[in-house]
């Protein structure tokens, strides 16, 4: 089961969400913790533009 991420991102956005995760993880030297922080900010921006 996959839980909804913080910030209210809708389930229909999960495919895009994971695409971003993969892109960030493969194109940068960010640690998993830094990726989590970046995704939280991305998520908040997506949920509340």
Image (cartoon, rainbow, N blue to C red):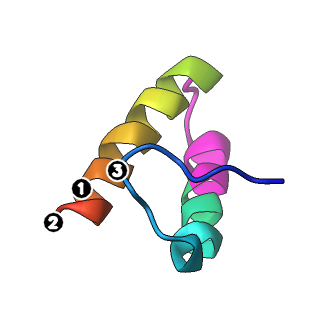
Disc tally is: 3
Q: Most extreme residue toward the right, as rendered?
A: 1
**Residue 25 in magenta?**
yes
Q: Position of residue 2 (x, y in %)?
A: 75, 53
Task: Determine which of the numbered discs, if any, sits on residue 42 in the image.
Answer: 3
Q: Position of residue 16 (x, y in %)?
A: 56, 72
Q: Residues within 10 Å of mark 1 (few under 14, many from 20)?
A: few
Asked if labels 1 and 2 touch by Cβ distance under 8 angstroms, the answer is yes
Please report the residue visible at 60 percent of the width from the left and 55 percent of the height from the top.
Answer: 23
Q: Is residue 46 left or right of residue 12?
A: left
Q: Which residue is mark 2?
A: 49
Mark 2 and mark 3: Cα distance apart in space: 10 Å
Please report the residue visible at 58 percent of the width from the left and 27 percent of the height from the top.
Answer: 29
Q: Is residue 47 left or right of residue 35?
A: left
Q: Earlier in the sequence, mark 2 or mark 3?
A: 3
Residue nearest the viewer, comparing 1 with 35? 1
Give the overall secondary structure of the magenta segment.
helix
User: What stretch of residues is rendered in magenta?
Assistant: 21-30
Q: Which residue is mark 1?
A: 45
Asked if labels 3 and 2 touch by Cβ distance under 8 angstroms, the answer is no
Q: Position of residue 13 (x, y in %)?
A: 52, 74
């Amino acid at each position: 089961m996959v839980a909804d991420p913080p910030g209210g991102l809708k389930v229909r956005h999960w495919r895009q969400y994971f695409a971003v995760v993969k892109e960030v993880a493969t194109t940068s030297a960010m640690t998993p913790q830094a990726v989590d922080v970046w995704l939280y900010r991305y998520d908040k921006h997506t949920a509340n533009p």
